[in-house]
Amino acid sequence: EFIESQLLYVTDEDELEEELENFIGKKKKEEFDRMMEKENLYPEKIIEFIDEYEYEDVEKPKAQTAKMVEKAFKENLTLLPRTKKRKKVIEMVLEFMKRFEF
C-alpha cells in the first residue's frame, strides 16, 4: 500500500524514509484504535500494559502485568469471562507489538 501511494512521488531518500515512518505510524494508530473499539478497552490502560511488558523484557507477561489488562476492560465481567478476555486481549496486543516491532 505504501509503495503504491508514495514510492512514485518521493524522490529524496530522506523524505522517503520519513514518509515510510509516517505511514507506519498512521497504520499502527488505526489498528490500535480499531482494536480498542472492537474489544471495548481503555487505550491508556493497554499502553500501560505495553510499557510494563517491554520493561520486563520477557517472552510472556508476568502474572501481575497480565492482570493490568483487566483494568482496560470497560465492562464488568465475572471471573471466567474476564479470564478468557484477558487472555485474548494479551494475545492480540502481543501480536500487535510483533507486527509493529515495539
Image (tube, rainbow, N blue to C red):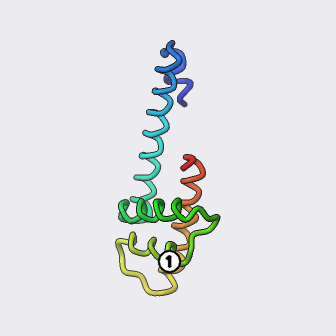
Amino acid under disc 1: Gln
Side of 40 where 20 appears, left or right: right
Q: Residue at x 46, y 60 (%)?
A: 51
Q: Could you say which quadrant of the image residue 22 lies in?
A: top left
- Most extreme residue toward the top is 11
- Most extreme residue toward the right is 59
Query: 10 or 5, which lies in front?
Result: 10
Query: 55 or 81, which lies in front?
Result: 55
Query: 77 or 90, which lies in front?
Result: 90
Rendered location of residue 44, percent (x, y): 35, 61
Rendered view: 101 above or below 1: below
Q: Could you say which quadrant of the image residue 90 lies in?
A: bottom right
Rendered location of residue 26, percent (x, y): 43, 39
For mark 1, give the secondary structure. helix
Q: Which residue is mark 1?
A: 64
Q: Residue at x 41, y 63 (%)?
A: 48
Q: Residue at x 46, y 27 (%)?
A: 18
Q: Residue at x 57, y 69 (%)?
A: 61
- Most extreme residue toward the bottom is 79
Rendered view: 1 above or below 36: above
Rendered location of residue 1, percent (x, y): 55, 31
Rendered location of residue 15, percent (x, y): 46, 20
For label 1, count other residues whose C-alpha is less than 10 Å away and answer few (under 14), some (14-19) or many (20+): few
